[in-house]
Image (tube, coloured by chain):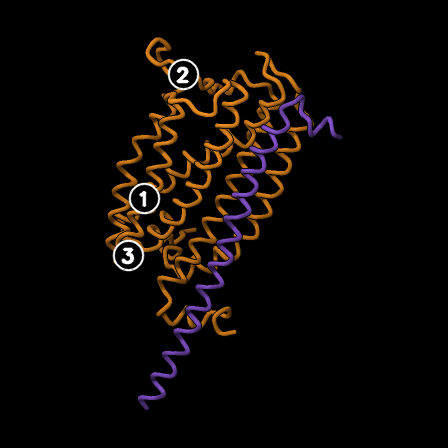
Amino acid sequence: MSEFFYMGGYGAYIWSSMAAAAILMLLEPALLMLKRRTVLQEVKRNIRLEKRRTRNKG
Amino acid sequence: MKINWFKYAAPMTFYSLAGRLIPLFWIAAIVLTTVGLYWGFFKTPDTIGNGMKEYYRIIFVHVASAWMAMWLYGVMVFWALIGVIFNTRLSYMLASATSITGTVMTIIALISGAIWGKTSWGTWWDWDPKLTTFLILLFVYVGYIALQSAIDDTRRSDKASALLALVGLAIVPIIYYAVNCPDPNQCASLHQESSLKRVESNILIAMLVTTLGFWMYSFATILMRTRNIILERERKTSWVSNLPEVKS
């Protein structure tokens, strides 16, 4: 098993390139999910404000 | 059967369609990338033809991300052009959503390329034609994103960045010819020529399957981002306020 990670001495290079790809490709969807949450909160807040404004007018 | 394509150009229809497709693309991305990398690490020889040792396995992420970086640039220009011609809001949103995933792919290709360079040529970076043009691709992507966020009026920023994307398209064939040079005397490059014919078949399978996985990943993230953009831009419409995720 350690032979597999050693990769004939090139392990550090191979695994760091895999890790760089993995980190970026996990970070991107994570940020997208976070963004979705904040956008949805923003939309809900706007609707609440809009409702309050129309109620005050009436 | 006649399909009305413009029906799907309505952000409302597209929003729900994308919502149903995203999980499928994620499953495909995870399965294909896992299979591709498994094949690449367990079914391939440790040493290949011209004395390349285990480090050649970097190509599984390097080639996949580099191909996607160039392909997504084309996709981005396609949607930007459709936006300019038909003036459809959704096309601009897709173009803008594609730019970020394209940038991520370009960064992965550059990082894995630098690591490859260190093992293969003994240097992290060199101003070789392929490497230099690929760095310019990153700058064009970043320029597109910067221009888009610099103009507040979305309709104007969409149009301006669409034109920038179109002009920047020139870099894609240059990247290709920078390595597959028609006359080797004219361009001295460190970067290996990319010829699929000479690649061992197991390595080729692993490379292509991983690339497909990255492609599915791109679909998933681009659709997720497009949905976020739709919500942001259409937040004042009644269909958004009637969405179940907004009402709850």
In this view of the protein, which residue sits in the foreground, B47 or B132?
B132
The chain identifier of the residue carrying mark 1 reads B
Chain drawn orange in the picture: B
Mark nearer the N terminus (3 vs 2): 3
Query: Which residue shows up at 55% across the image and 30% down it?
Result: B208
Looking at the picture, how far across and down is residue A15, in whole percent? Answer: 61, 32
Q: What residue is shown at x 42% (from left), y 73% (from top)?
A: A45
Q: Nearer the viewer, mark 1 or mark 3?
A: 1
Residue type at tag 1:
Tyr
Q: Chain of mark 3?
A: B
Of the residues under marks 1 and 3, which one precedes in the sequence? 1
Both labels 3 and 2 in a single chain: yes
Q: Where does label 2 land, which residue?
A: B189
Q: Amino acid at mark 3?
A: Thr
In-front residue for pair B140/B42: B140
Work out whether B72 lies above or below B112. below
Q: What is the letter of the purple chain? A: A
Judging by the rendered image, the residue that carries numbered circle 1 is: B144
Mark 3 or 2: in front is 2
Q: What is the CA distance from the residue labelled 3 to the residue labelled 2?
A: 42 Å
**Which tag, 2 or 1, sits closer to the chain's start?**
1
**SS assignment at label 1:** helix
- Examine the image and state in which quarter residue B60 appears: top right
How many residues crowd around disc 2 within 10 Å: few (fewer than 14), some, or many (20 or more)?
A: some
